[in-house]
Image: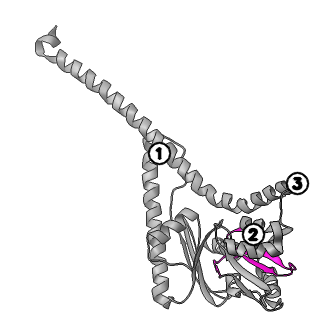
Amino acid sequence: MLDELLGRASLKERIDDLEDENDRLRKRYEAESDRRAEAATARQDAEERINRLEDRIAQLEGELERKNADDGGLDVRGRDLLRRDRLEELVDRLASFRTGAEGALTIGVADDGLTESVRTQLADVLGERVALVDDAAPCLCCVDDAGLIAVTLEPPTDPDPMATWDDRFALEREWFLPTGTHALAVVRTDLFALGVYEGDERIDYRGFESNVKGSHSKGGFSQARFERIRDEQIDEHLERCRTALAAYERGGERTDVPLYLVGQRGVVDALVDDSQLQPAATAAVDATGAPKQALEDAVRSFWTTELRIL
């Protein structure tokens, strides 16, 4: 009665209505935050798994090819991952091969496979096994007209030579092996390391780690806030990476020195897209540990060539 006389009853009813509305809005916001948090967490998980999945692609393709062979399909006669001394020996052996005039074909095969003209030429030597060259794309293919040598190579760089028939295979060591002065940088969301090399000897180094938050499993406002902080930290880290690369180029006038940029695929792509960088090649590699250890892992992984014997 007293509340009604003093006009407080209507105010209390209004307060109750506003509190109910506030509860509805809070629940709606939290539901939306949960959806965004789940999407962000899924994106993090996907990014972290990309490199591991890419590293397993060759293995899974090999298993599939062996399965096809068991079912009567085609399969390569052998395959291997080569680096350092074994890779150098293979390149030297292929480069030393000699045959008659226009008896050795060297061809870079793009992602979409062979052109019809080259396919026709190869079919005369490989027959139906020419399909294995398409399966290996992108790659470098070396075949002689007698079928004594028929291999594909997947080097770290992208030479992409025109189809060349000669008395020898047209191979360059720098397609496969670290030669001359070059730089290799590895980038993760929390790490940067750059090495300058003369051949396979490192002559300069710089690297750092950034304080970037890891995964977060909680939902709601804390997850949304966590994501904003993490994205800001990653942006700051990438800016540090760009600054380090720019300082490297200015300090040594490296315009003629090839730069290979490797690491987490999404981070590498973002770094290239948002800068003036024009790396000689990029690659997704699984480099773990502190900067120097990650750089060593990246160098070992990058300078690896897959060999397939057709």
The mark closer to the camera, 1 or 2, is: 2
Distance, label 1 to label 3, CA atoms, is 49 Å
The local secondary structure at tag 3 comes to helix
Please give the residue where the numbered disc 1 appears in the rendered image: 223
Depth check: give the residue in front, 270 or 205. 270
Whichever of labels 1 and 3 marks the residue nearer the N terminus, that label is: 3
Residue 127 is covered by the magenta coloring: no
Please give the residue where the numbered disc 2 appears in the rendered image: 133
Q: Residue at x 78, y 85 (%)?
A: 104
Residue 155 is covered by the magenta coloring: yes
On residue 70, the disc is 3
Q: Where in the figure is residue 83, as x and y percent of width and height?
A: 76, 77
Left or right of residue 286, residue 150 in this image: right
| Start-end of magenta stretch | 137-161
State the image quarter where residue 60 is shown: bottom right
Left or right of residue 223, residue 21 in this image: left
Name the amino acid type tagged 3.
Asp
Q: Where in the figure is residue 87, as x and y percent of width and height?
A: 78, 80
Name the amino acid type tagged 1.
Gln
